[in-house]
Amino acid sequence: MPKHSVSSNRLVVALTYEGLCAFEFGITAEVFGLPRPEMGDDWYRFAACAERPGRLATNAGLAVEVDKDLELLSEAGTIVIPGWRSEGEVPSDTLRSALLAAHARGARLVSICSGAFLLAATGLLNGRRATTHWRYAERLQMAYPAILVDADTLYAGDDRIFTSAGSAAGIDLLLHLVRLDFGPDAANSVARRMVVATHRSGGQAQFIERPVLARSDSALGSLLDRLRSNPAEPWTIERMARKAAMSERTLARRFREETGESPLAWLTEQRLGLARDLLETTNLSMEHIADKAGMGSATNLRLHFTSSVGIPPNVYRKQFRRAAA
């Protein structure tokens, strides 16, 4: 099981650069930089640095003023790379050495979206599972074949190196870091203030560009709504096809066009999402959760949950359980 990194050094430093990705920088400042007195005196401290301090342009038509240089990285507990230049520019030896030195002394390195290219250039991702935006995944894999690029997951990482997919997936990863450092209640609190979900089910496949059904009230759309509302029902391909008034072959093709997954794979994700909610909010046994989520048995739940989430359901409950109603 992966070793998950918890940082006791609360200084989070965002690494800025010319052409800074404004959204990625903004969510980093939102999670780590806002005053949160309700979290106590041990909450994060936030700062930014640059290889060449001064006025830096962003990709949003505005500029930021940064007065700290790379020396600040030597003090950071967590270093966030909020994107990187879209062409994947190789960093200078100075920047590369500063990141390697920070990691060697124990800092946690985190990339959002194209920031994975900067981490990759240090060599620290070699032999590791990593992700980036699905549009960049093939390019990252070709440029750095020693990396195990996962183009589907929203974020990946352990042992002080983390990567996330497209921009909004950075929020998922940053909330995950809060959860590791302060526990699920703190992550839930930050998520509520940001008005976002604490957890999102599924991976990047659901966001890859594909044709959209012409009518939202189509037979397939109605079927998807019913599956979302009643995932625990005994759904089979035959029954789904009958409800959608189409052949099984047509159902499979249309389903993949709409969701990027097969009908049963998509249904399993909905069931796992329900299981996660039950694990977080109830004291139900694994057998009861498996039954309510349509997973059949606790053994089946454990198998699919561990494969999808990366940890067994009982471990997930210990880490992320909220106060049961």
Image: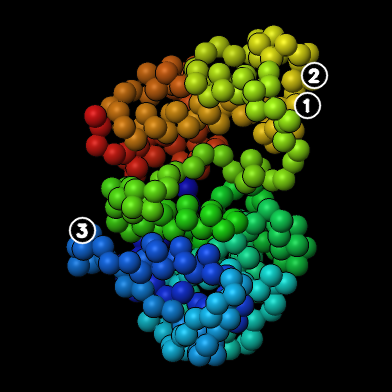
Q: Is residue 5 in sight in this rendering?
A: yes
Q: Secondary structure at mark 3?
A: helix
Query: Residue type at mark 2?
Result: Arg
Is 280 positioned to the left or the right of 148 in the image? left
Q: Earlier in the sequence, mark 3 or mark 2?
A: 3
Q: Position of residue 130 (x, y in %)?
A: 60, 58
Residue 187 appears in the picture as rendered = no
Q: Amino acid at mark 1?
A: Arg
The colour scheme applied to this rendered structure is rainbow
Query: Vertical placement of 94 versus 62: above or below?
Result: below
Q: Nearer the viewer, residue 56 or 287?
A: 56
Tell me if label 1 and label 2 are in contact, CB under 8 Å.
yes
Q: Residues within 10 Å of mark 1 (few under 14, many from 20)?
A: some
Whole-Å distance between the Cαs marked 3 and 2? 54 Å
In this view, the residue in front, 314 or 9, is: 9
Question: Which of the labelled discs sits on residue 249, or is there none?
Answer: 2
Residue lying at 44% horizontally and 79% vertically, measured from the top left: 48
Q: Position of residue 98 (x, y in %)?
A: 52, 84
Spatial distance from mark 1 to mark 3, Cα to Cα?
50 Å
If the image is split into quadrants, where does the C terminus sit?
Answer: top left
Q: Which residue is mark 1?
A: 253
- Residue denoted by label 3: 38
Instruction: Please state which of residues 46 and 95 is positioned toward the viewer in this rendering.
Output: 46
Q: Is residue 308 left or right of residue 6?
A: right
For the point 55% across and 31% down, the residue is 269
Q: Secondary structure at mark 1?
A: helix
